[in-house]
Image: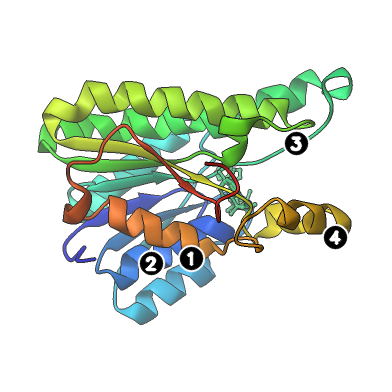
Amino acid sequence: MNLNGKIAVVTGAAKGIGRSIAIALAEDGADLVITENVTSASDTAKTIEAIGRSALVVKADVSNPEDANRVVESCIEKFGKIDILVNNAGINKDSLILRMKKEDWDSVIGINLTGTFNCTKAASRYMIKQKGGNIINITSIVGAMGNPGQSNYAASKAGIIGFTKSIARELASRNVNVNAIAPGYIITDMTEALPENARNELTKLIPMERFGTPEDVANCVCFLVSEKASYITGQVIHVNGGMYM
Ligand code: NDP
């Protein structure tokens, strides 16, 4: 995809899917603002710079609206515009409903769903003025299917789907495309935390018989933010090896 001259913000880009998305966007020509939370994103930044693109690292907790505003303001200050926002940062805190603590409910909704709202609100202001932009929200197969032990996570990800469709409708006339990507099971720290037998059982439910890679998701992002996808908005694209169809 040709993303030369585009400026992209990717949240949670220190590792996993966010890191792959940031690198893939850089490989296609974009300059980046990447956020880090606890884990340093300097390695991701070095990789982007080695490709020949710019990478500005901003420390931010996306659940905090002031942090989200600062990320976007830093992008405008350095690059003068924001073309692409990828709301990738996310966590899970799993337990069955009777054991789920209120704080685990709140933090998962606060980071996954409210974090997506915070960053989208901050970026939309500029995208509306620019009369153009692209927002990608990373949801999950679990937001579509549900999953025992993940009611907080599923609610946050299903919320992201409704949010995506609403903002797509709000911003379509301003030439801002808003889509969600729903990965299935992808090899990152998040799924490494699953016991091996659970990973084996899950693999049996995937027609392609393997977990996805972060690059499988990143490739989809690059397509959706390119000119080639300019008539696609308000959609949820599933990247899951056929696990949910
Ligand atoms: P990782 O745990 O590998 O990475 C998550 C990233 O989000 C980290 O960089 C983390 O930073 C960051 N993050 C966490 N909390 C915050 C916060 N409050 N503010 C800013 N950044 C934060 O997970 P994945 O790469 O697997 O997940 C990325 C996204 O993809 C998530 O939204 C996840 O829900 C989604 N997803 C993942 C799937 C999978 O199978 N892996 C499947 C479907 C969806 P730090 O570590 O420093 O806190």
Marks 1 and 4 sit apart, C-alpha to C-alpha, by 22 Å
Question: Mark 3 or mark 1, which is nearer to you?
Answer: 1
Marks 3 and 1 sit apart, C-alpha to C-alpha, by 24 Å
Dot 2 and dot 1 residues touching (CB under 8 Å): yes
Q: Which residue is mark 3?
A: 93
Above or below — where is 21 with respect to 169?
below
Asked which quadrant contains residue 103, the reply is top right
Badge 4: how crowded within 10 Å, few (<14), some, or many (20+)?
A: few
Residue flagged by tag 1: what amino acid is it? Glu
Q: Which residue is mark 1?
A: 215
Badge 1: how crowded within 10 Å, few (<14), some, or many (20+)?
A: some
Residue flagged by tag 4: what amino acid is it? Glu
Above or below — where is 62 with respect to 5?
above
> Could you say which disc has been placed on residue 244 in the image?
none
- Residue behind label 2 places its C-beta within 8 angstroms of ligand 1: no
Q: Which residue is mark 4?
A: 196
In depth, the one of 146 and 35 nearer the eye is 146
Mark 2 or 1, nearer chain start: 2
Which element type, helix, strand or loop, lies under badge 2?
Answer: helix
Asked which quadrant contains residue 65, the reply is top left
Question: Mark 2 or mark 1, which is nearer to you?
Answer: 1
In depth, the one of 199 and 8 nearer the eye is 199
Mark 4 or 3, nearer chain start: 3
Residue 171 percent coordinates (x, y)? 21, 27
Residue 137 percent coordinates (x, y)? 42, 39
Marks 2 and 1 sit apart, C-alpha to C-alpha, by 8 Å
The quadrant in which the N terminus is found is: bottom left
Marks 4 and 2 sit apart, C-alpha to C-alpha, by 29 Å
Q: Which residue is mark 2?
A: 24
